């Protein structure tokens, strides 16, 4: 098997790493891992076709076959991306979002004592937050899960709208990033339902959606009017969550010392250095 057959080399390597006992296969074997026919059966493809893939024959596989092999070989997200790159020369589409975050990620959020931080999906559903975000942005635990969506709150909740210094700029930003993420994921049922709901309930959303603007989350400035602290300026930054292409971390750092003071008071960190 030549070095130019990177797909075949990778498939064979991951196949031989699998523990047969984990799949209910017992008895002694002369070679490690699962056999070709066992991977083919798990992936729902013929043994001949799988053998050709390991041998570098038969042409490039389809994205659907690569996704089946991802499941059959129990690959991680990083391994899945590598499989697509060596198999067809481009990365895969991100998988549909799944709910929840790991306890470790939640502990990281909680460690940001006066920096609001949230974890969002491509649909702008909020799946995790820290106390600073709850005190500054929205009291998320009091909301039903379906209402923990930034698009719905910006377009349908008067209180959220009133708290924004530049509502239209924020609304356009959210719609443009939502469109970009929807294109990356494909219009799944969640995206279609959200677009339908907001288009019917808000003429402003319908107009902005029709304008076809796209952009990435990136970073920028958020200005809030808080009920007790007045104007607060925050610098937001977004980060990918490793191993979870369906999630993004967004942090809101106080823009200057005065904003930091306000955030410390809100988060009961007045005595912090």
Image (cartoon, rainbow, N blue to C red):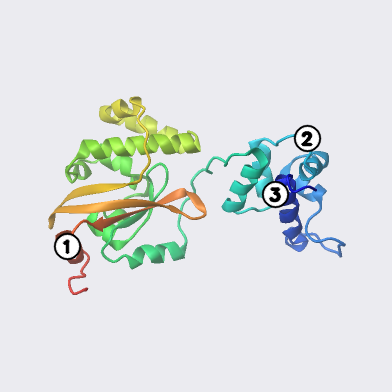
Callout 3: SS: helix
Where, by quadrant of the figure, is residue 105 drawn?
bottom left
Callout 1: SS: helix
Mark 1 and mark 3 lie on one chain; the one further toward the N terminus is 3
Residue drawn at the location 48% of the way across and 37% of the way down: 184
Answer left or right for 30 relative to 5: right
Residue drawn at the location 13% of the way across and 57% of the way down: 229
Between the C-alphas of marks 1 and 3, the distance is 53 Å
At label 3, counting other C-alpha atoms closer than 10 Å, the crowd grade (few under 14, some 14-19, many 20 or more) is some
Can residue 120 be seen here? The reply is yes
Question: Which of 128/223 is in front?
Answer: 223
Residue drawn at the location 16% of the way across and 64% of the way down: 261
Quadrant of the frame with the C terminus: bottom left
Q: Which residue is mark 3?
A: 72
At label 1, counting other C-alpha atoms closer than 10 Å, the crowd grade (few under 14, some 14-19, many 20 or more) is few
In the rendered image, residue 160, in percent from the top left (x then y), is placed at: 22, 45
Answer left or right for 85 relative to 10: left
On residue 257, the disc is: 1
On residue 58, the disc is: 2
Mark 3 and mark 2 lie on one chain; the one further toward the N terminus is 2
Question: Which of 181/255 is in front?
Answer: 255
From this view, report whether residue 39 is shown above or below residue 177: below
Mark 2 and mark 1 lie on one chain; the one further toward the N terminus is 2
């Amino acid at each position: 098997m030549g070095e130019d057959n990177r797909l075949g080399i990778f498939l064979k390597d991951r196949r031989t790493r699998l523990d047969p006992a984990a799949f209910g296969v017992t008895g002694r074997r002369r070679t490690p891992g699962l056999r070709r026919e066992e991977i083919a059966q798990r992936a729902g493809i013929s043994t001949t076709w799988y053998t050709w893939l390991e041998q570098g024959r038969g042409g490039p596989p389809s994205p659907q076959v690569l996704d089946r092999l991802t499941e059959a070989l129990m690959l991680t997200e990083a391994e899945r991306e590598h499989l697509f790159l060596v198999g067809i020369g481009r990365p895969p589409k991100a998988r549909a979002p799944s709910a929840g975050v790991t306890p470790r990620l939640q502990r990281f959020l909680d460690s940001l004592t006066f920096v609001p931080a949230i974890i969002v999906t491509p649909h702008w559903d909020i799946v995790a937050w820290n106390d600073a975000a709850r005190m500054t942005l929205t009291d998320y635990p009091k909301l039903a899960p379906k209402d923990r969506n930034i698009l719905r709150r910006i377009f349908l909740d008067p209180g959220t709208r009133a708290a924004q210094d530049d509502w239209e700029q924020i609304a356009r930003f959210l719609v443009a990033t939502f469109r970009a993420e929807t294109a990356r994921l494909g219009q799944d049922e969640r995206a279609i339902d959200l677009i339908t709901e907001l288009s019917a309930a808000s003429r402003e959303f319908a107009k902005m959606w029709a304008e076809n603007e796209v952009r990435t989350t990136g970073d920028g400035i958020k200005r809030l009017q808080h009920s007790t602290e007045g104007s607060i300026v925050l610098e937001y930054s977004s980060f990918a969550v490793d191993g979870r292409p369906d999630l993004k971390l967004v942090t809101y750092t106080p823009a200057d010392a005065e904003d930091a003071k306000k955030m410390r008071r809100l988060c009961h960190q007045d005595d912090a250095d």
